[in-house]
């Protein structure tokens, strides 16, 4: 392949070229699509060794970059998954791209869910809306044969506005069939009298289903309003702030702690985060 | 290496020898200011300036810099793939940089040159450059470098320090780079003791002229959230018009934006200076903005310089006391007053 660099040893701003292999429309409003991409060269794929919870800067030449959580798991090789909400310039363009098109990814960026430290513990995963992407990565990772025995009970509370807004519906069904993961899927409301999911907001279902904090950690990722009301529920059950793990979002450009915009106090969400414990967030200004 | 002297009438000769090895930059008069630009001859430079309005940071972090180029022409096999833009990183010497700016580059190094990531353009430009500093014989009334770790003849971050002692410049090499530069310029004439003594007196007198002081002693120990929630931000931010001039002139402001610009089927990814004064800096695609209010942005600028930076790098404040923001703020917001408000804050 032709030369992309001019001799810098490493350039953290240089995206790896990838090809869009498959585009899946995830939600009924067509605003969320999952892009399955593969690296143009195997060396790039090798360099892109990531952990659940990390993100990448998606790069579209001529449009720019945007930070997107990695939805695939390191246990799935040969491709990356990004589930993208159509919101700004880059993501709107991305939604109009087609299979076979070339784009770039830069990463992996940020810290990750400290799954090694969760070994032997029960893990509660709470997600809402389209913030379920890195949680999918985490679940797929933990359910992988070589990893499942490292963790205790795995409980999931996942909510969306309605059935049509749930991500990864085939996988959700498959996980519901398994005995080694407890799935509590809920929708805010439903027209379907035979709705197979719970009906109610995530905090309510969390309160009903998560009744013990013993030897447990909770990972929460969702819209601010969901977090605001779920946090007291977890605290009431007995989760200390050190055992509540969250992932933040802020506007980003560089993704490597240099361009200055995503800071929350002295921490850069892109480099020192996006994953923070509630204990840490309690010491920081609420600028997110 | 001894302190050497460079006679002012021989400065052109000195520069001529440097030109064989270095790309030369110096303070060039532009209207009523000086600006660091390429120079060919001593006559191009004004070495009697007080300070440049724009700090020399753009030599390492240009206001606009092309990073990558790409083609959108699908007939090409490299369509849509970003490639680094070729740049000249041959040796460069900058003559006449003020010690405050040189100190600022060091403070900014911790952002761009980290254990995990290195910003290649900043690092390469820094490596390629030899900084020939010019000490400040007559500091401005707004200078307060001496209370933030600097001095008008501070050597930190410089490769050579020049002292203007009338008919000659005394040149002191501070690093190997600096020594090489003086050798290249064939500046071997050792300064007599009498001249060195005169330089010392000039340096001491200059430091004594800086009467503006700030106190930073409590900043590290103060609680972040207490300062963040302090009541003085309300009064302080009121006059601010978010023009951003403070951030553009500041030698320690490094924030930038990255944008793609396409013309026809070819384009570049460019980075531009950005500013925490602008609401767009932090605006999410969803419309949410964690610093959508002016008070939040004003607080961010000062908290970053005087508290977050202090805590993150244990490297002192991210301010070198150059006074540029004090001089040029259209509504007279004075960072020296903010030092005082923050440092003396009691909840």
Image (tube, rainbow, N blue to C red):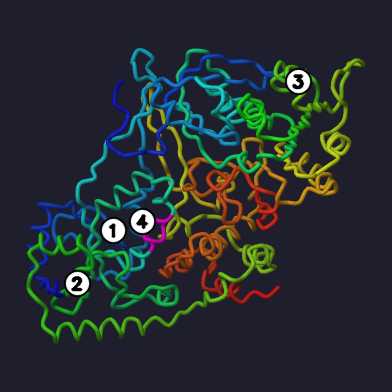
Res B187 label: none
Q: Residues within 10 Å of mark 2 (few under 14, many from 20)?
A: many
Q: Earlier in the sequence, mark 1 or mark 4?
A: 1
Q: Are marks 1 and 4 in contact (CB under 8 Å)?
A: no
Q: Work out whether B219 lies above or below A57.
A: below
Q: Residues within 10 Å of mark 3 (few under 14, many from 20)?
A: few
SS category of the residue bearing label 3: loop
- Label 4 resides on the chain identified as B
Res B30 label: 1
| Chain part drawn in magenta | B104-110
Tell whether position B306 is magenta.
Answer: no
Res B172 label: 2
- Callouts 1 and 2 in the same chain: yes
Residue marked by disc 4: B57
The part of the image, by quadrant, that contains residue B71 is top left
Q: Are marks 1 and 2 in contact (CB under 8 Å)?
A: no
> Marks 3 and 2: which is nearer the front?
3
Mark-to-mark CA distance, 1 and 3: 74 Å
């Amino acid at each position: 392949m032709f030369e992309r660099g001019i001799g810098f040893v490493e350039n953290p701003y240089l995206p790896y070229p990838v090809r869009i292999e498959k585009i899946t429309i995830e939600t009924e409003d067509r605003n969320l699509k999952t892009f399955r991409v593969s690296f143009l060269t195997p060396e790039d794929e090798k360099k892109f060794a990531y952990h659940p919870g990390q993100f990448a800067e998606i790069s579209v030449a001529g449009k720019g970059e945007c930070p997107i959580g990695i939805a695939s798991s390191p246990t799935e090789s040969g491709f990356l998954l990004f589930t993208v909400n159509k919101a700004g310039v880059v993501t709107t363009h991305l939604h109009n791209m087609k299979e076979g098109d070339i784009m770039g990814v830069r990463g992996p960026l940020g810290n990750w869910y400290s799954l090694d430290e969760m070994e032997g513990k029960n893990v509660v995963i709470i997600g809402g809306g389209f913030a379920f992407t890195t949680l999918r990565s985490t679940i797929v990772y933990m359910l992988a044969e070589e990893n499942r025995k490292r963790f205790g009970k795995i409980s999931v509370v996942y909510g969306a506005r309605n059935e049509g807004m749930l991500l990864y519906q085939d996988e959700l069904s498959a996980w519901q069939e398994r005995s080694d993961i407890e799935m509590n899927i809920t929708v805010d409301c439903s027209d379907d009298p035979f709705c197979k999911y719970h009906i109610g907001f995530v905090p309510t279902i969390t309160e009903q289903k998560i009744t013990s904090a013993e030897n447990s950690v909770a990972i929460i990722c969702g819209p601010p309003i969901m977090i605001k009301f779920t946090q007291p529920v977890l605290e009431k059950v007995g989760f200390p702030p050190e055992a509540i793990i969250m992932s933040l979002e802020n506007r980003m450009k560089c993704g490597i702690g240099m361009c200055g915009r995503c800071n929350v106090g002295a921490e850069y969400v892109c480099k020192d985060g996006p994953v923070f414990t509630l204990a840490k967030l309690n010491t920081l200004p609420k600028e997110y | 290496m001894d302190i050497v002297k460079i006679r002012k009438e021989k400065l052109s000769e000195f520069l001529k020898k440097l030109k064989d090895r270095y790309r030369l930059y110096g303070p060039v008069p532009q209207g009523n200011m000086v600006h660091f630009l390429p120079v060919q001859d001593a006559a191009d430079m004004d070495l009697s300036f007080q300070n440049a309005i724009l700090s020399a940071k753009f030599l390492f972090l240009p206001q606009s810099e092309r990073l990558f180029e790409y083609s959108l022409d699908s007939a090409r096999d490299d369509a849509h793939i970003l490639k680094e833009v070729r740049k000249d990183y041959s040796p460069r010497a900058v003559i006449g940089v003020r010690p405050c700016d040189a100190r600022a580059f060091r403070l900014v190094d911790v952002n761009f040159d980290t254990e995990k990531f290195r910003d290649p353009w900043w690092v390469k430009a820094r490596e390629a450059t030899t900084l020939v500093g010019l000490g400040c014989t007559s500091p401005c009334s707004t200078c307060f470098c001496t209370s933030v770790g600097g001095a008008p003849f501070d050597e930190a971050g410089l490769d050579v320090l020049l002292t203007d002692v009338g008919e000659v410049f005394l040149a002191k090499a501070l690093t190997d780079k600096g020594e090489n530069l003086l050798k290249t310029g064939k500046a071997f004439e050792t300064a007599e003791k009498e001249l060195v003594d005169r330089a010392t007196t000039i340096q001491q007198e200059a430091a004594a002229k800086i009467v503006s002081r700030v106190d930073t002693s409590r900043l590290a120990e103060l609680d972040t959230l207490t300062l963040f929630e302090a009541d003085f931000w309300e009064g302080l931010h009121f006059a601010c018009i978010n023009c951003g001039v403070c951030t553009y002139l500041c030698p320690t402001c490094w924030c930038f934006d990255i944008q793609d610009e396409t013309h026809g089927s070819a384009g570049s990814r460019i980075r531009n200076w950005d500013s925490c004064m602008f609401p767009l800096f932090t605006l999410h695609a969803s419309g949410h903005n964690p610093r959508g209010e002016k008070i939040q942005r004003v607080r961010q600028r000062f908290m970053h310089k005087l508290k977050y930076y202090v805590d993150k790098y244990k490297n002192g404040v991210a301010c070198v006391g150059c006074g540029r923001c004090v001089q040029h703020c259209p509504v007279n917001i004075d960072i020296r007053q903010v030092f005082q408000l923050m440092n003396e804050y009691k909840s």
